Amino acid sequence: MLLILGSASPRRRDLLAQLGVVPDAIRPPEIDETPARGELPRPYCARIAREKARATEAGEDDIVLAADTTVAMGRRILGKPESAGEAAQFLHALSGRRHRVITAVAVRRGERLWVRDVPSAVRFKRLSDEEINTYLASGEWQGKAGGYGIQGLAGAFIPWISGSFTGIVGLPLAETAGLLQAAGYPVWKDRP
């Protein structure tokens, strides 16, 4: 039995390491992550995690772990910005407001699939143009849903959260450990 991580995210690998879990292989699948017309953020996020888990190449007895993180303002999905200009639009929209971060985790073993989505609420302080420009210049916005990562410089923009900090980073650890155990992966094996 191998544990295969269906994600190229170094943050997810780091979070798994906090559980003492090291994937045997990393195989990020290629899927279309375009939201369907009228698709709401939470169902979208769960669908993408399921599709990633199903698309990840694995043996019959291997366990696949995949996840998706979505930033939502109401019904609007803020994906990974394609440019600094789009990241600036996202940061201006988030400034001084609350939004949701949803991370869905999917674990597959053979034909069985376990999925959990974990929503969290995040409040941004009101951002100055200087803060936004400095953040954009850092490049940290690249490859991150909503154009920011709470675990980096943007942590200084966030005075309040409600929910799972690790879920906001990209992998809710309590739920992930539960799903891995449900699939038969010994999360706490050989641990004191």
Image (cartoon, rainbow, N blue to C red):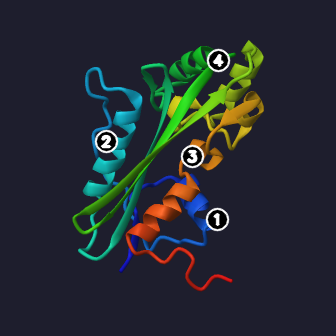
Counting residues from the N terminus, which is met first, the one under dot 2 or under dot 1?
A: 1
Q: Which residue is mark 1?
A: 18
Q: Which residue is mark 4?
A: 97
CB within 8 Å, label 2 to label 1: no
Q: Which residue is mark 2?
A: 47
Counting residues from the N terminus, which is met first, the one under dot 1 or under dot 3?
A: 1
At horizontal 31% and vertical 26% (from top left) the residue drawn is 39
Quadrant containing the C terminus is bottom right
Give the Cα separation between the discs numbered 1 and 3. Answer: 13 Å
Give the Cα separation between the discs numbered 4 and 3. Answer: 19 Å
At horizontal 37% and vertical 56% (from top left) the residue drawn is 28
At horizontal 68% and vertical 44% (from top left) the residue drawn is 151
The amino acid pointed to by label 2 is Arg
Counting residues from the N terminus, which is met first, the one under dot 2 or under dot 4?
A: 2
Counting residues from the N terminus, which is met first, the one under dot 4 or under dot 3?
A: 4
- Secondary structure under the numbered disc 4 in the rendered image: loop
Q: Which residue is mark 3?
A: 167
